[in-house]
Structures are given as structure tokens and as C-alpha cells.
Image: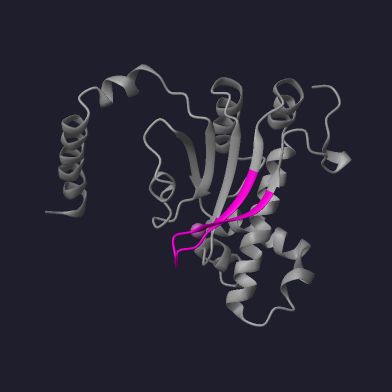
Amino acid sequence: MKPFEKLLFDNKEWAAKQVAADPDYFKRLVEIQSPEVLWIGCSDSRVPADKITDTNPGEIFVHRNVANLVVHTDLNLLSVLQFAVEVLNVKHIIVCGHYGCGGVKAAMTNHSLGLIDKWLWNIKNVHRLHRHEIDHLESEEQKLNKLIEISVKEQVMNLAKTSIVQKAWKHEKSPDLHGWVYALEDGIIRTIFDLPAGSHIDPIYEYDNL
Ligand code: CO
């Protein structure tokens, strides 16, 4: 069986197992989607959002990209964010990175990987702004993991800079923003940074007419 055929085979097995355990399982899910959490994670195959949080279909709304970045010109991310906040009314947005992230690692080198260089510029920018917190660390692994933590914090701040989040903070008093980092070594998520709804951000980014 080829890998893609195995996916289809396992899908049928999984669907049958769900119905065997709970005959109304799919019927319930078809009727409504009301997740309270938007998850922004890395595309890395080792960090599937629902698996590592043991959540069921219907519980979290997910966006994933290389190195879990919040980029203000990314129409895909902005659309997910706007829909999650204004239509689904999610109460929490989690940016979850992971230690050993290949995207962040690539951004720390001077090696071109093609088109993705442009995407990784965003991480190089974070590195440039926080060089003083990173350069003094001893090993390459420590430097990488520090940048991963700092980047997650920066991505959370990027969310707060959007008019979408600021408008929701003003009118809905939500969502709360969270920055987490998952460790591949032990499967545990570390909490890095919280930005509750209504938090103050650098005034240059605050909109006064939302
Ligand atoms: Co990654």
C-alpha cells in the first residue's frame, strides 16, 4: 500500500471506530462548529494541534504555517483570524511554537533555501531586534530555543497589533492571547507569554477609532 492509500484506508477504519463507539458522533459535528480556541502552530508534521492537546474535532480552529508566524500581509492568516474572532467568537488565541523548529533554525543560518527565504525574513527580523538576548548563550541549541521562545512572544504581539484583535478587545473584552512552546522531547507544552484581552501595547500600534 502506498503512503497516500494508507491514509484513505486508515480514514475508513477511524470513521468506523468513531461510529461504533458513538453512533451520533458525526451527526453532532455536522450540525455546529463552535470552537473557543484559535490555534496558530507550525506546519511541522510532529506537532499536530489536536493530537498534542488531546482535543476532539470541533474544539479548536487551526491555522498552521512554517514557524507559526503572524505576518500582517498574510491574507490566509488574516482571514482565519478575522473569521475566528468575529464569526466564531473564539475566547483564546494560542500561538504554539516548538523547540528545534526547522524554520527558525533555517532563519539563523546564511544559507538560501529558495522562496521560503522571504518567509524566514520575519524570523531574521525578530533575531535582529533581540540579538542581545541570544548572542551571549553558549550552545547553538540554546540560541535556537531562545529565539523560538522570543519569536512566539513577538507573534502574540503581532496579533495584538491587528485591528481585528483590537476591535474585539474593545467591544467583546476578548480574546486572550497566549504564547506556548511545545517540546518534542517530552511532549509537554511550556507556557511562555500571556497577553490578556485589553492589555496595553506599544501606543504606536494602537488604533483609536475602532
Ligand atoms: Co517548526
Where's the C terminus, which quadrant?
Answer: top right
Image color mode: one colour
Picture residue at 48% right of the left edge, 38% below the top: 62
Taking the view exactly as shown, the residue that stands out farthest to the top is: 31
Asked if the magenta segment contains residue 173, the reply would be no
Q: Nearer the viewer, residue 89 or 18?
A: 18
Q: In the rendered picture of this protein, how many numbered marks are placed on residues? A: 0
Picture residue at 58% right of the left edge, 63% below the top: 104
Task: Measuring from the top left, give residue 38's x and y in whole percent.
Answer: 54, 36
Side (left or right) of 14 relative to 181: left
Where's the N terminus, which quadrant?
Answer: bottom left
Side (left or right) of 85 relative to 66: right
The correct choice, above or below, for 154 with respect to 147 in the image is above
Task: Measuring from the top left, give residue 29's x and y in whole percent.
Answer: 34, 24
Residue 20 image-quadrant placement? top left
Picture residue at 60% right of the left edge, 58% below the top: 120
Side (left or right) of 96 relative to 192: left
Q: Nearer the viewer, residue 141 or 115?
A: 141
Task: Measuring from the top left, give residue 205's x and y in whole percent.
Answer: 82, 38
Magenta part, dominant SS: strand
The correct choice, above or below, for 184 with respect to 180 in the image is below
Taking the view exactly as shown, the residue that stands out farthest to the left is: 1
Asked if the magenta segment contains residue 184, the reply would be yes
Task: Measuring from the top left, give residue 27's x and y in whole percent.
Answer: 27, 20
Please state the extent of the stretch shown in magenta in the rendering. Answer: 178-193
Picture residue at 72% right of the left edge, 26% below the top: 173
